[in-house]
Image (cartoon, helix red, strand yellow):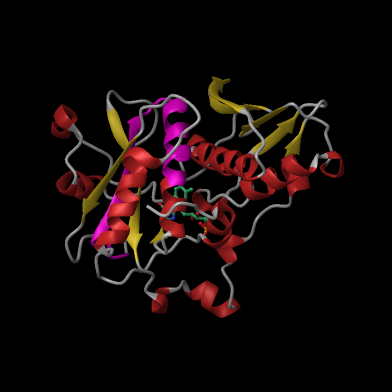
């Protein structure tokens, strides 16, 4: 495995890539990624998220209109709010590490459940019951599910989205300014440098349909930061917005770590949504 990873560069260069070359990931790169996911990565809280790599044959329609590349990864967890949010955190560590290794990825919450079960049997007894067509469904179900999956491969550059090609930019990369994301009275200009830096990396996190529904609450003494979506938030098309909050929490934690700021990380549940508390 590479000794050091430039996490800031990984955050700034990661993009959702939806078109892939039909070739497998090179063996050494794949082995580095597997090693990181299975034993190398440090996660600052207890969790039971599993990272499972799997192969897709040519022509597999795991991802709606797009062809799957040969290598893919699934983030498996229980389906309660805390577990799916932890899947976001852990999954994003793997996604960013893959980015640092030069690989392309894309979080998919809406994958073909039937195709995933064929390629990566994981439903057990539930396989005999009717399953949703796209993704694992809504609400809490017994056992573990693939909370999200991602292709892992090489960007097929001709496949860049038409809208992005027209503007010459990745429009999906647009992010809300920090000022719009702060709750609880502390103003952007008052933030200590370390917290401002970590929030800046956190707001660059990917979210389903780029909805960026995370909000940051910084205590007046700057000792506690919480990340959560507004209570009662619902997304029209994405059933599990707490996954995205875990992804955002991962970026924030990396941002503090890059500045050697130690913290205690506690993922919790309040008012039916995930709330990530960082005590600095
Ligand atoms: C939890 C999650 C689920 C997502 N699900 C899908 C999906 O089902 N299909 C898809 O095309 N993109 C999906 N995306 C990708 C988002 O559309 C993308 O992250 C967002 O537009 C921001 O663009 P960027 O990742 O290039 O920064 C998902 C992203 C996240 C974080």
Q: Residue at x 69, y 52 (%)?
A: 176
In percent of width and height, residue 185 lies at: 83, 32
- Can residue 111 be seen at all in this image of the molecule? no
Q: Residue furthest front?
A: 3
Q: Which of the 4 image quadrants contains residue 139?
A: top left
Q: Residue at x 34, y 37 (%)?
A: 137
Marks counted in the figure total 0
In percent of width and height, residue 153 lies at: 33, 63
- Can residue 14 be seen at all in this image of the molecule? yes
Magenta stretch holds residue 70: yes
Foreground pick, 43 / 226: 43
Q: Residue at x 50, y 30 (%)?
A: 44
Foreground pick, 90 / 182: 90
Q: Which of the 4 image quadrants contains residue 226?
A: top right
Q: Is residue 256 above or below residue 107?
A: above
Foreground pick, 166 / 147: 147
In percent of width and height, residue 93 lies at: 46, 45
Q: Is residue 272 above or below residue 14?
A: above
Q: Which of the 4 image quadrants contains residue 215?
A: top right
Apparent side of residue 238 relative to residue 114 in the rendered image (left or right): right
Magenta stretch holds residue 250: no
Q: Is residue 55 above or below residue 187?
A: below
Q: Magenta residues, as a range?
A: 66-93
In percent of width and height, residue 79 lies at: 37, 28
Q: Which image quadrant: the C terminus? A: top right
């Amino acid at each position: 495995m590479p000794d050091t990873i430039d996490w800031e560069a990984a955050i700034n260069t990661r993009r959702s890539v939806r078109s892939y070359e039909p070739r497998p990931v090179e063996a050494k790169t794949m082995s580095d990624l597997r090693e990181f996911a299975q034993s190398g990565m440090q996660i600052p809280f207890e969790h039971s998220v599993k990272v499972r790599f799997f192969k897709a044959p040519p022509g597999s329609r795991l991802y709606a209109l797009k062809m799957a590349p040969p290598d893919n990864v699934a983030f498996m967890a229980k389906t309660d709010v805390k577990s799916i949010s932890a899947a976001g955190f852990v999954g994003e560590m793997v996604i960013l590490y893959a980015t640092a290794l030069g690989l392309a990825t894309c979080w998919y919450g809406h994958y073909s459940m039937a195709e995933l079960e064929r390629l990566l049997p994981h439903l057990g007894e539930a396989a005999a019951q009717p399953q949703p067509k796209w993704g694992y469904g809504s609400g809490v179900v017994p056992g573990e599910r693939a909370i999200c999956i991602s292709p892992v491969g090489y960007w097929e550059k001709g496949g860049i989205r038409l809208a992005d090609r027209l503007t010459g930019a990745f429009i999906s990369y647009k992010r809300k300014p920090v000022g719009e994301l702060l709750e609880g009275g502390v103003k952007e200009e008052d933030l200590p440098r370390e917290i401002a830096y970590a929030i800046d990396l956190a707001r660059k996190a990917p979210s389903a349909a780029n909805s960026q529904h995370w909000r940051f609450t910084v205590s007046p003494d700057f000792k506690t930061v919480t990340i959560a979506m507004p209570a009662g938030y619902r997304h029209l098309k994405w059933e599990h917005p707490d996954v995205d909050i875990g992804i955002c929490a991962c970026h924030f934690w990396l941002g503090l770590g890059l500045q050697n700021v130690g913290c205690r990380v506690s993922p919790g549940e309040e008012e039916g949504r995930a709330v990530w508390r960082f005590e600095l």
